[in-house]
Image: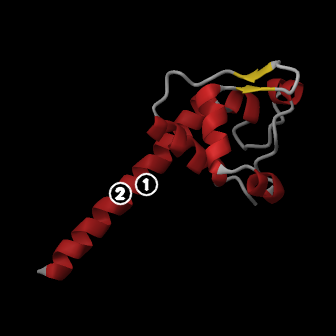
Amino acid sequence: MKKLIALTVAAVVAAALSAAAADGKALYEKECAKCHGSDGKGQTKMGQKLGAKDYTDPKVQAELKDEAAFKATKEGFKSKDGKVLMKPAENLTDEEIKAMIAYMRTFKK
C-alpha cells in the first residue's frame, strides 16, 4: 500500500512539473520570443536592436542567475544610461515568471 501511495505521489509530481514546463514554454512564446526568439538566440529584429543575449550559450546561462532573470522580468530592465530595454511583466505571477525562466534554461546547449 505504501508503494502505491508513493508511486501515485510521484506520478502527480511528475505531471505537475510537466504541466509547468508546458506553461513556461507557452508563456515564453507569448511574452519573450518577440525579442529573445523562439530558440532563445536573441536574433530577432527587436532582439538585435536591444542587444538580447543568446540563451543557447552556456556562458551566458551561467552568468545569468535565476534571481537576476526574475528581477529583470518582474521589474523590467534598463541599460546603464537608463534606456528601457525590457518592460516589466506586470501581468504575470511569480510562478509564471519562474516557469518561463525554467523554460529559458532549456535552451543551453
Q: Which mark is residue 15?
A: 2
Which picture quadrant has residue 62? Answer: bottom right
Q: On the image, numbered disc 1 is attached to which residue?
A: 18
Residue at x 87%, y 29% (from the top left corner): 48
Q: Position of residue 39 (x, y in %)?
A: 72, 44
Query: How is the structure coloured here?
Result: secondary structure
Residue that protrudes farthest toward the top in the picture:
83
Q: Does 105 sit above or below residue 85?
A: below
Category of crowding for the residue at label 1, using alpha-carbon neighbours closer than 10 angstroms: few (below 14), some (14–19), many (at least 20): few
Q: Is residue 73 left or right of residue 91?
A: right
Residue at x 82%, y 18% (from the top left corner): 83
What is the CA distance from the residue labelled 2 to the residue labelled 1? 5 Å
Q: Position of residue 97 (x, y in %)?
A: 53, 38
Quarter of the image that includes the N terminus: bottom left
Q: Does 16 sit above or below residue 87?
A: below
Category of crowding for the residue at label 2, using alpha-carbon neighbours closer than 10 angstroms: few (below 14), some (14–19), many (at least 20): few
> For the residue labelled by badge 2, is the local secondary structure a helix, a strand or a loop?
helix
Between 98 and 23, the one lying in front of the other is 98
- Residue type at mark 1? Ser
> For the residue labelled by badge 1, is the local secondary structure a helix, a strand or a loop?
helix
Q: Position of residue 32 (x, y in %)?
A: 65, 31
Discs 2, 1 touching: Cβ within 8 Å: yes
Which picture quadrant has residue 81? Answer: top right
Q: Position of residue 49 (x, y in %)?
A: 88, 24
- Residue type at mark 2? Ala
